[in-house]
Image: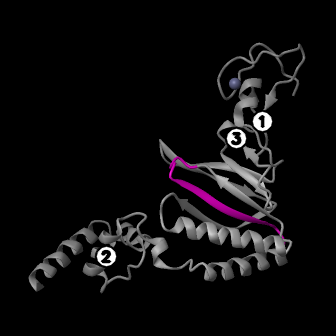
Amino acid sequence: MTEVGQDLICALCGEPIVPRDPGDRPYTGDAGTAYEGKPICDTCYDEDTCEPAATIYYGGDHDEPHLIGSCRNETEGDFRVKWHSTDPWRGYYECESGEYVEVFTDAILSGHESEEMLKKLYDRVLERFEEEDIGFARVFCRSSNVFMTSLEIWVKRDFVQLLKAHAIIAQAKGEVDYDNPLYSTGILFPRENLEKFKDLLGKKYNITTDKDLADLAAEKGNDLLAELVEAAKGGVNEG
Ligand SMILES: [Zn+2]
């Protein structure tokens, strides 16, 4: 593409792109970004990674994050981002990769009991991956919920490395008591409310975690409300 001119518009800010020197080609969005191949002005390109969609660290290295913004991709195509909107104002970014496979993902909830446990799990897994020479990347994707950061570990697409990675993660989960319901409650509902739901409907449904209750509510819809009212009446009569 040699198309350069006054009428070329930046796909990000909508301003005309003025070449510094005649014949200069404008930037275009990098592969794997939302603005892939579209013309981008110098300012937008330079400032793009101020609020990255994804931050990638290769291996245990803490110093050199590789960022993916709207039009810049510093992973040279190893990772691509996709925006998933959950409503017009909310959503989250998700990474895709041909080179790496996601082996672990969870959300860090600021202030929740699981925060500490997840950090322990994460540190343990990284340590073991380095010992076993597993090629991995840590990926942090941005979401519109400021209290939540996704935590992802990706491993080079290699059969043996992947199996080793899964075995290490399974072992580390046991070490930190990952499946303790403490870590999967108190997220969507206050814990005492979940306990009340269990008292009323626990005989009929298997409700252990917040997600169990959310799934049940999604499946039953208004029927669940009716059942709840009935169960509450029964409770009053018994008492
Ligand atoms: Zn611009």
Q: Secondary structure at mark 1?
A: loop
Q: Could you classify mark 2 by the number of other residues whose Cα lies within 10 Å: few (under 14), some (14-19), or many (20 or more)?
A: some
Q: Name the residue: 69% across, 68% down.
A: 123
Q: Are marks 1 and 2 in contact (CB under 8 Å)?
A: no
Q: Over which residues does the magenta segment extend?
A: 143-158
Q: Could you classify mark 3 by the number of other residues whose Cα lies within 10 Å: few (under 14), some (14-19), or many (20 or more)?
A: many
The residue that mark 3 highlights is 69
Judge by depth and name the residue closer to the eye, 171 or 225: 171
Asked whether residue 41 is in view, the answer is no
Q: Secondary structure at mark 2?
A: helix
The residue that mark 2 highlights is 195
Asked if 17 appears above or below 184 in the picture, the reply is: above
Asked if 115 appears above or below 45 in the picture, the reply is: below
Mark toward the viewer: 3 or 2: 2
> Residue 4, located in which quarter of the rendered image?
top right
The picture places residue 231, in percent across and down from the top left corner, at 20, 78
> Residue 43, located in which quarter of the rendered image?
top right
Instruction: Inspect the image, locate mark 1, and give the three-letter code of the amino acid beneath it.
Output: Gly
Left or right of 211: which side holds 163?
Answer: right
Q: Name the residue: 88% across, 14% down.
A: 21
> Residue 201, located in which quarter of the rendered image?
bottom left
Instruction: Inspect the image, locate mark 3, and give the three-letter code of the amino acid beneath it.
Output: Gly
The residue that mark 1 highlights is 37
What's the coloring here? one colour
Quadrant for ligand 1?
top right
| Circle nearer the N terminus (3, 2) | 3
**Mark 1 vs mark 3, CA separation in Å:** 14 Å
| Circle nearer the N terminus (1, 3) | 1
Report whether the residue tagged 1 is closer than 8 Å to ligand 1: no
Instruction: Inspect the image, locate mark 2, and give the three-letter code of the amino acid beneath it.
Output: Glu
Asked whether residue 33 is in view, the answer is yes
Left or right of 90: which side holds 52?
Answer: right
